[in-house]
Amino acid sequence: MSLYDGKKVILLGDRDGVPAPAMEECLKSTDAEVIFAATECFV
């Protein structure tokens, strides 16, 4: 059982850092539900 099992998750990625799709891929092995994922440019 993981810390994220059964949780709803909002992912905000950074264009020059870790993008949201990469974080979403890491959470696929858990039971987390990604309800929003976006990659933005924070300048």
Image (cartoon, grey):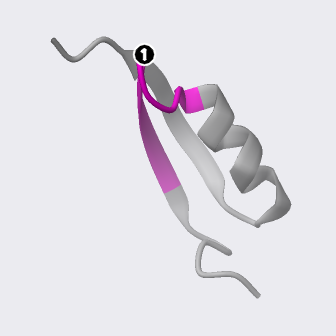
The magenta stretch is 9-20
Residue 15 sits above or below residue 37 on the image: above
**What crowding class fits label 1: few (fewer than 14 Cα within 10 Å), some (14-19), or many (20 or more)?**
few
Q: Judge whether residue 7 is colored magenta.
A: no
Q: Judge whether residue 11 is colored magenta.
A: yes
In the shown orientation, is residue 25 left or right of residue 9?
right
Q: Residue at x 54, y 30 (%)?
A: 20
Identify the secondary structure beneath mark 1. Answer: loop
Hey, which residue is sitting farthest left in the picture? Answer: 43
In which image quadrant can residue 10 be found?
top left
Hey, which residue is sitting farthest right in the picture? Answer: 29
Closest to the observer: 36 or 38? 38
* Residue hosting label 1: 15
Dividing the image into 4 quarters, which one contains the C terminus? Answer: top left
Residue 36 sits above or below residue 38 on the image: below
In which image quadrant can residue 1 be found?
bottom right
Q: Residue at x 60, y 45 (%)?
A: 34
The number of numbered discs placed on residues in the rendered structure image is 1
Q: Position of residue 42 (x, y in %)?
A: 21, 17
